[in-house]
Image: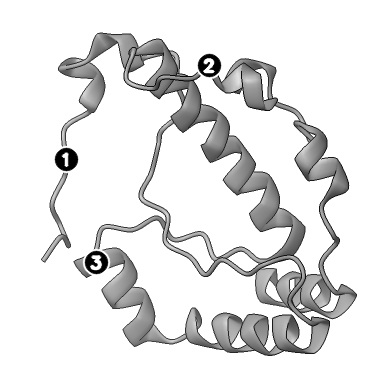
Amino acid sequence: MFEGVKFPSAVKKFPSLEPYQAINPYFGIYIRRDTPAEVVEKIAEAFLWAVQQEGFKKVAVQQRAGVWAPLVGLASDKQMSRIEAARCTALWDLQIAKNDPAQFGIPKPADWSWPPHDRAIKATGWPANVETMFKQLKK
């Protein structure tokens, strides 16, 4: 069980990570952009129902030490883009990655803004109903 366990900061062992935002263990469902809108809506509906269940939250947070941030639609796109920037920049700066993220239009976390690159600009939008469902969850 992870409940009640406090993990030490990785920055103490790796001081060079200090400038980067936390690279947290996010779990999610990834859906292709060309998935039919009615399928996306059903998946989002099921996801939003599931994350409101106490059993789901217990497993996701207490037992898996996950980040509790249920997101769908544009909010999810933005968060995943920030994580992409943080992870890719860290891997490049620490000389783990072979390619500079800038080659792919991925900004450094300090330079991130929405939309961060052409892929985000060209991405198919989410069905309006998905955005409405997410806003209702936030209330």
Q: What residue did someone put label 2 on?
A: 100
Q: Is residue 123 left or right of residue 103?
A: right
Q: Which residue shows up at 65% across the image and 80% down it?
A: 44
Give the quadrant of the C terminus: bottom right
Q: Is residue 130 left or right of residue 31?
A: right
Give the quadrant of the N terminus: bottom left
Question: Residue 15's quadrant in the figure?
Answer: top left
Which amino acid is tagged 2? Asp
Crowding at dot 3, Cα within 10 Å, few <14 / some 14-19 / many 20+, comes out as some
Disc nearer the start of the sequence (2/1): 1
Q: Nearer the viewer, mark 2 or mark 1?
A: 2
State the SS at label 3: helix
Q: Which residue shows up at 22% across the image and 28% down it?
A: 9
Q: Is residue 91 left or right of residue 29?
A: left
Disc nearer the start of the sequence (3/1): 1
Q: Which residue shows up at 51% across the image and 59% down it?
A: 69
How far apart are labels 3 and 1 at the CA level? 13 Å
Disc nearer the start of the sequence (2/3): 3
Q: Which mark is residue 103?
A: none
Q: What residue did someone put label 1 on?
A: 7
How far apart are labels 2 and 1 at the CA level? 30 Å
Residue 78 appears at what percent x and percent y? 69, 46
Residue 114 appears at what percent x and percent y? 79, 35
Q: Residue furthest front?
A: 98
Crowding at dot 1, Cα within 10 Å, few <14 / some 14-19 / many 20+, comes out as few
Which amino acid is tagged 3? Gln
State the SS at label 2: loop
State the SS at label 1: loop
Q: What residue did someone put label 3 on?
A: 62
Which amino acid is tagged 1? Phe
